[in-house]
Image: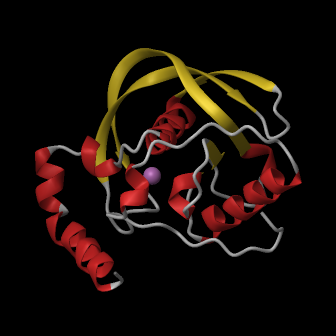
Amino acid sequence: MPADLELNLTLYPSPFLRRVAPVVKTFDEGLKNTVTNMLEVMYKNGGVGLAAPQVGLDLRLLVINETGDREKTEGELVLVNPTITSRKGENTLHEEGCLSFPDIYAEVSRPDACTVKAQDVTGAALNLELTGFLSRIVQHELDHLEGILLVDRMSAGDKLRNRAALQELVDTYKQGL
Ligand code: CO
């Protein structure tokens, strides 16, 4: 991808968000530019994580910064071809949002800790043990690579509470077709 390409957010209910993202095989300048562009979209929209399918890219690639602050680059985490190798700890409920579901929030139950195997942007192996908020972000973003979305993880009550906002997204999507 060229360095200055503008990426746009893919919103629910685009069927693109339902695809299983294919493995990244090429670690080159283009991939580094893709990461830079994805981080830009994430920060611009006030997110703490973004998966490639959310910007229309068919790649197993996540960018994360749990601080959401572009100045705190030490918080940036780039995961290429991530897989969760184990889930541990108590299942906890916590409110989640998603850049593909603007203004929609829901309580999602996930295990507190996980271990993740991935590659960095150069292709080097990463093994991470994560807990708390970062573990939750990674689990949320990894769902995107499998085509699993916030709406699938919502309780019936949260779905009802967000019904009007979800319907608005569906209507907006249909108008754009
Ligand atoms: Co999301």
97 or 28: nearer the viewer: 28
- Please determine whether, in this image, residue 62 is positioned above or below residue 44: above
Indicate left or right for 159 with 175 as reference: left
Q: Quadrant of residue 78?
A: top right
- Please determine whether, in this image, residue 97 is positioned above or below residue 127: below
**Residue at (16, 72) in percent of width and height:** 164
60 or 161: nearer the viewer: 60
Q: Residue furthest bottom?
A: 175
**Residue at (39, 68) in percent of width and height:** 102
Residue 15 rendering spot, x and y as whole percentages: 36, 59
Residue 7 rendering spot, x and y as whole percentages: 64, 71
Can residue 51 be seen in this snapshot?
no
Residue 153 rendering spot, x and y as whole percentages: 27, 41
Indicate left or right for 18 with 55 as reference: left
Indicate left or right for 146 with 12 as reference: right
Indicate left or right for 177 with 72 as reference: left
Can residue 169 be seen in this snapshot?
yes
Residue 123 rendering spot, x and y as whole percentages: 81, 32
Q: Residue furthest right?
A: 29
Q: Quadrant of the N terminus?
A: bottom right
